[in-house]
Amino acid sequence: MEPESTPKLHKAPRSDVTQDQGKFRIRFNFPGRNHPNHDDHGYGPLSTVVESFMDPDTLIAMHQHRNEEIVSWVPAGVMRHDDREGNELVTDSEHLLVMNAGNGFWHEERTLADDPPLRMLQIFVRPHSLDLDPGIQHGPTEDPVDNEWRHVFGPAESDAPFTVRNDVHCYDARLDEGASVDLPAVSGWDTYFYVFEGAVEAGETHFDETESGLLVDSDGLAVTAREDSVLVAFCIDPDAPVTRQGTIGR
């Protein structure tokens, strides 16, 4: 039996857990299912990474979220957000939206008829405590630099540009074909990554678009783009205290 500290890279193929609501379609990626000996669909505070598709002229009517942190990451196109707090916000490749739902936050999402088709990620993080104060963060992101990781969000006590209320850091990278970068790493934490576009290799393992990897008990691993690629990576404290009463992620 191998020692517990042996580094492991666990690959998951494209998820087959989907919902088709016509003009709105979603695919659920569960990071905990990458690990063969894990009995939770989430991995520590990272509960679910949802690939969402919205056709032009689509409305997701006003609804409530509770006890989860929801990050809307839009690499292209626009996602329009309205809420009961009077916010009318546009999230696109230059802006990020974080809903810290806490004890309850109501919002709706839409695309207009002349908007392009939208493919985005909605990232669900389990907070460390139930019924926290609700809030929203929306603002410009740093300009991406090709072949480098960009810090997207992190724990509330970190210096990340946007924050969630548990121990998860998120990064994204746009890699040119042939470029290599080391996966983001935090000592004692694990790293989950998702190939949003393109194809990469990590170690001797190949990952195509919409496939994911979970690196455990390791301080890092290089990934190399086999074609122009877009990656999202999460450094996760697997032992962080979590709640499991979110509206979607749980």
Image (spheres, rainbow, N blue to C red):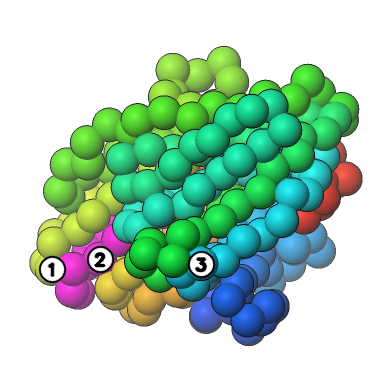
Predominant SS of the magenta segment? strand
| Residue 106 on image: x %, y % | 75, 39
Amino acid type of the residue that numbered disc 1 sits on in the rendered structure = Glu
Report the front residue among 106 and 148.
Answer: 106
Precedes in sequence: disc 1 or disc 3: 3
Q: Is residue 164 magenta?
A: no
Amino acid type of the residue that numbered disc 2 sits on in the rendered structure = Ser
Query: How many other residues sit within 10 Å of disc 2, few (<14), some (14-19) or many (≥20)?
Result: many
Residue at x-position 29% and y-position 74%: 199
Q: Which residue is mark 2?
A: 229
Q: Are marks 1 and 2 in contact (CB under 8 Å)?
A: yes
Report the mark closest to the observer, 2 or 3.
3
- Above or below, 58 against 48 in this view is below
Residue at x-position 37% and y-position 47%: 92
Residue at x-position 22% and y-position 41%: 144
In space, the residues marked 1 and 3 are separated at their CA atoms by 35 Å
SS type, badge 1:
loop
The boundaries of the magenta stretch are 222-232
Q: Residue furthest front?
A: 113
Residue at x-position 52% and y-position 80%: 13
In space, the residues marked 1 and 2 are separated at their CA atoms by 7 Å
Precedes in sequence: disc 2 or disc 3: 3
SS type, badge 3:
loop
Q: Is residue 214 left or right of residue 18?
A: left
Report the mark closest to the observer, 1 or 3.
3
SS type, badge 2:
strand
Q: Which residue is mark 3?
A: 57
| Residue 154 on image: x %, y % | 51, 30
State the image quarter where residue 64 is shown. Answer: top right
